[in-house]
Structures are given as C-alpha cells and as structure tokens.
Image (tube, coloured by chain):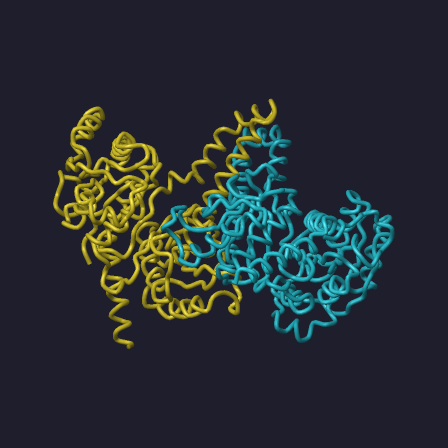
Chain colours: A cyan, B yellow
Amino acid sequence: MPADGDGTGAGIRPASGVLSVDAMGGDLGPEAVVAGLARAIRHTPAMRFIVHGDSAVLSALIAKRRGLSDHVTIRHADGVVRMDDKPSQIVRQGKDSSMWSAVESVRTGEADVCVSCGNTGALMAVSMIRLRKLPGVQRPAIAVLWPSRSAGGFNVMLDVGADIRADPDDLLQYALMGSSYARNGLGLERPRIGLLNVGTEETKGRAELKEASDLIEANAGAAGFSYVGFIEGGDIPGDTADVIVTDGFTGNVALKTGEGTARFVRDMLGEAFSATPLSKIAALLAMGSLKRLSKRIDPRRVNGGVFLGLNGTVVKSHGSADETGVAAALDLAWNLSRSGFSERLKSRIASATRAKETQE
Amino acid sequence: MPADGDGTGAGIRPASGVLSVDAMGGDLGPEAVVAGLARAIRHTPAMRFIVHGDSAVLSALIAKRRGLSDHVTIRHADGVVRMDDKPSQIVRQGKDSSMWSAVESVRTGEADVCVSCGNTGALMAVSMIRLRKLPGVQRPAIAVLWPSRSAGGFNVMLDVGADIRADPDDLLQYALMGSSYARNGLGLERPRIGLLNVGTEETKGRAELKEASDLIEANAGAAGFSYVGFIEGGDIPGDTADVIVTDGFTGNVALKTGEGTARFVRDMLGEAFSATPLSKIAALLAMGSLKRLSKRIDPRRVNGGVFLGLNGTVVKSHGSADETGVAAALDLAWNLSRSGFSERLKSRIASATRAKETQE
C-alpha cells in the first residue's frame, strides 16, 4: 500500500501533493475558480495546483491574488466544454479543452486528483476514456456527501448518476468503493453500509436488490465494513448507515429531491422571517444560530461528487460553484490526495476481485 | 357523469356523503381515529361516517365526544390488521378485520371513500381484491400531495409505492389518473404533468421513459392536461409541474427522502433555536411565523395517500397519524367524495381506453 501524500508542498512534484484544476467550464467562469484556489490555500498552504485553461486570462486572474502564483502552474488549453455539450461530441472533438487537459494530468501522474466544475456527462466520458476503469469495475460511480445525523455530520451516497442501471455485482462494487471512500474521506474505520430500497422488510423491493443484499452481506467481513441491510429514503440523512448504496437513477432522483426539499424549506424559512416586524427582529437575534444551521445544510460546503472506479480520482464540483463551493471541492480533493485514496481504492478492488476469482 | 355529493348530510344514505373509516390498525389506536372524526365534523358538520372496529371500544370512545354519535354508524369487526401482517396473510385470513369491512362498505356503495391508517401493503391487497381494478388499468397507484411552490401550495406525485415497476402504458395511466386527481382534489382545470427522470435533456434517462414521454404527450390534448416533459427530483416541490409521474420504486424513495430531509432540517432548526439564550428569545419572537412555516411543511396536514385505479377510492392515512393527521385524511376523503371523483376518474380512464382501442 502506498504512503500517504506527504503534503510538505515543496514545489510541484511529479507524484502526490498536486491537484489538477479545470479552470473553465463552470457557470461562473475562471474568476470563481481562481477565487476558490486563493481561498483554499489560506487554509492549506501546502496545496499545489496545475490549472488548465486560457493562459492569458488565468495569469491575469492569478496575478491579482497575492501569493497564489507560487502555488500554481498554468497549463494552456484553447477549448472549453460548455454545459450543453454532448459527451460524445467532447470525446471526439474536445482534446484541446481544459477539461481534457485536466484529466490528462492525473493520467500522467503529474497530479493526484482532478477537479472540474464542468458538465458531468462530458467529465465522466473524458475520465473513462483517459483514466480507464479499474480492473474488476464494470461501472464507475459518482459519490456525494450528504449532511446527516451521523457522528461525522455526513453520509456518503453512491451512485448519484454515473450510470442509470446497476446489477447486483455493480452494487457490490459500489459498497466496496463507498466504504473505501468513507474510510479515507470521512475517517471511518468500519463504515456502515445500507442498500436503498422501498420498505425495510425482506419481502419488499426489487428481486435484484435481494441478490445484491446477499452479495454485499457476504463480502462485509473481508472488506472491513458493516452491512446494515435495506434502508429507506428517510435514512439517507439519518444515523443508520454511513454509506448509502443505490443505482444511479434512484440516487440521482434522491439527491435532487433532497436538495430541492432543503432549498424549499430554506426559502419558506426566509419568508417566515420576513413576514412580520416581530419576526424580522427575531431573525436578527437568531442570526448567529441561523448561520450555523445554514452552514450545516449549505450544499456548497459538501460540494464535490467523486468519480470512483477509475485509475485516478476526479472530483466534479457543482457547475454553479462559487468561491466557497470551489474551495470545498479543492479541500475534498486534497484530503483524498493526502490519504492516498486512489491507490488504496485500487488495492481494495483488486483484492475483492481476486477473492471472487478464487471462489469461482 | 354523476352529480357531486350534495353534502346535506341528511343521515346516512346508501349513496354519497358517507366516509367509511377503519378505526383500528393505526399506531395510536382507535382513540386517535375517533379524535380525528370529532375534529373533522367541527369543520364540516355535513360529514357522515361508517366506523369499523370493536363496537364496545368504539361506542365508549364516541360517546365521550359531544354530538359525534349523530354522525356515526358503528360496524363491528373482530379482527385488526397489524403493521407487520403480510398482505397475503390478510387476504387469506383477514375477512373479519376492520380494514376488510371498511373497504367492503365502499364496494357495496354504502360509502364513497374508505379511510384507513393501517398497513399499506395489506390495504392495497384488500382494496384490489374487493374493489377490483378499473377496466383499462393494469397497475393501481398511490398518489400523495407534496408541499410546493405551485399556486395552490401542493403538487401531486404518483406512484409512491403501490407497485415497484411501471411500463410506459402504466405511466400514461398514472398521468391520466394524476390529472383527474389534481382536477378534483386541487381544483386545477388543466394540470401540468411532468415525468420524473434524471436530467432534462432528451438524451438522458431510461429508454422506457422516452417511450412513456411520447405516449403521455400524445394523450395530453384529449385528456385535458398540459405535458411539461421530463422533470428532475428538484422540481418535485417546484412550480414546474402540478403532477409528478413516476414508478412506485422511485416515487417511494423520493417521498421518503423528501420527508426525511424536511424532518432533518426542522430538527436542525430546533437545535439552532435552542443553541444560545439570544436564539431562545428569537424563537419566542418568531413563534407566529415559525408556526405558519411549520404548518406549511407539516406532513400531517397533507396526510393521505390516495389509491387510484380501483372501482372506488381509498385514502391511506399515515400509520402514525394523530388527531390532526386523521382529520386531514378525512378532509381529503370528503373533498374527493363531494367532487364525485371515483366516477369522474372511471369515465376518464374509460374514454382513454376507448380512444386507444379505436387507434389500434
């Protein structure tokens, strides 16, 4: 097993300690990305970046941020992947894009983790083509962190949209990858894995989920996680499971529904507090507490879907990520880089695949 | 088309104006149900009930509520369906249960709508067997109201768990039934229908959803609804569609995720307001506004999943419904009874089925 990234940050090195950042393609443009870089190094001065995009634009933006240029190598790319570009188009014509270039730096080993705010479908397509799937993984997955009642304040859910289908073997892979992610990203030694279903009774749900449940249970011991069985939608923000395993269709609907509901409640709360003069005063008095709440459930703070199951780790930031959102995605990428996550995940999958081959 | 229920409430009549209520089987027992009946008639003195369960227990509870006995006929039933009873068991052995008896009153035409807090699976199984599916309906569905940004404050979503699968024809039926429900339950003349998917681009999502989308679009004109196309999880509480159509697996996960997220945010809000002395004072000042908010997003107020696609309407109340929750389910049942919903839905489905047969 490889050593963790040492994080001493002695300039840009060919191995770990470097993040590859696609500076173009987000809704707010390179300004937001560069602001995020500046914010991230205030917390973590050891961070080093290769930043991909229009070099003239980027040099000017970076020069404005005191001390940032010491942390950055700019890699010029002419093209930009737009939000409405089709993945197939990018794969054929996107080789000059900042996204392609950013993924490439992970492939060559110059950087550990790639971060992009671009179009999810295109980023997954480019990542699949350049990084390739880990041996033993049929479908890569996108994992997100979800604010929850668990001790660490977050649960992991995957897949939230890399692939709209998943068979029992895929769901087992998601359990393995998710537990590896929870171990390295959330510091949980023995993550609790739950399989999303309707109703917790064994008689309910789809047949392929029963098969997946048996498979995951059989692998729990060897893979070092606890399997808590079927869970329901209400358990996603709960303290029952640390890792929620599901197919990408269901996971994407759940993610968007949860985000939409939180946004709806937050908006209603805002209306409630501006409804009467008394409630406006109350809002002022409660400002500190409300800010803490809002921070706790702020989607920007858990910004970053992580692509799992490839030879290298890619963090997909929200397209609309601002400075705070970009910095959160960079922090996440940094933690994964420091823990040597890519290599650990690879060896975990390899040992599960070997075990399966031995059984067969 | 039948006349609406007249609601004059002149005693119990064999036709409309009567609700059939399963008083047993909820988590809080017959006390909560009888309290709900008493609450409901305070708003709507015209309501009449046939109440099913242990007659000794029910008479005693009803006698304690002033004036309630004038609104109620008690129908004795020995058995009770428990939350953990299996549907197949109930179908074989549950004929003496209050649930069976409550559905039976709708079948015989003594009552318009049945209300039960019992086990969903058992209630659906009994309803299917006794009421039977409407001609042209392959899979019945459960529809719920969801607090939303729409003008009326609610959207309809179906199916949320009657069946874990749905093919394109079923999804078309759900669109027809959901638009009929929105018309009668929410008073929307031309409901906007959306089909739940991942990503709104036409190239995304499952193949059967594309087929369903075409089918629903082709039927929009004749059925009197607008079709807004694919929507995402974030649109469920939004103002894009009044009716969200999906299969029962996805719908159930979305429903539970939304409820769980709203509960999580509410609990965090409670913690925020008790965090400091200042925030406690703020909570007092904002009490009125917070109560309005909490009412707006209170799941008890939208209590009642409606079984659609049967010869008769059944409202499934939350198992844990208290007085407020039961009264909300009764109000919903009353509105559907008054609008002659069962007959209107039947004729809507019949005309769509005829149109389809003519095309073929």
**From where the camera sits, is residue B234 visible?**
no
**Quarter of the image that includes the N terminus of chain B:** bottom left
Q: Is residue B174 above or below residue A261?
A: below
Q: Nearer the viewer, residue A339 or A40?
A: A339
Percent of width and height locating residue A358: 56, 61
Q: Of all residues shown, which one is farthest toward the bottom?
A: B360
Pick the front one: B47 or B174: B174
Locate residue A322, reporting x and y percent.
Answer: 69, 51
Q: Is residue A14 left or right of residue B311?
A: right
Q: Is residue B97 visible?
A: yes
Number of numbered callouts drawn: 0
Looking at the picture, tell me which residue is in the foreground, B245 or B14: B245
Q: Residue at x 77, y 58 (%)?
A: A111
Residue B195 % position (x, y) = 43, 61
Q: Is residue A79 above or below residue A173?
A: below
Residue at image position (72%, 63%) is A103
Residue at the spot x=27%, y=38% of the render? B25
Q: On the picture, is B180 further left or further right than B68? A: right
- Image height check: is A305 above or below B100? below
Camera-nearest residue between A154 and B340 = A154
The quarter of the picture where the C terminus of chain B appears is bottom left
Q: Give how far across and how far down residue A269 sits, in percent.
A: 53, 38
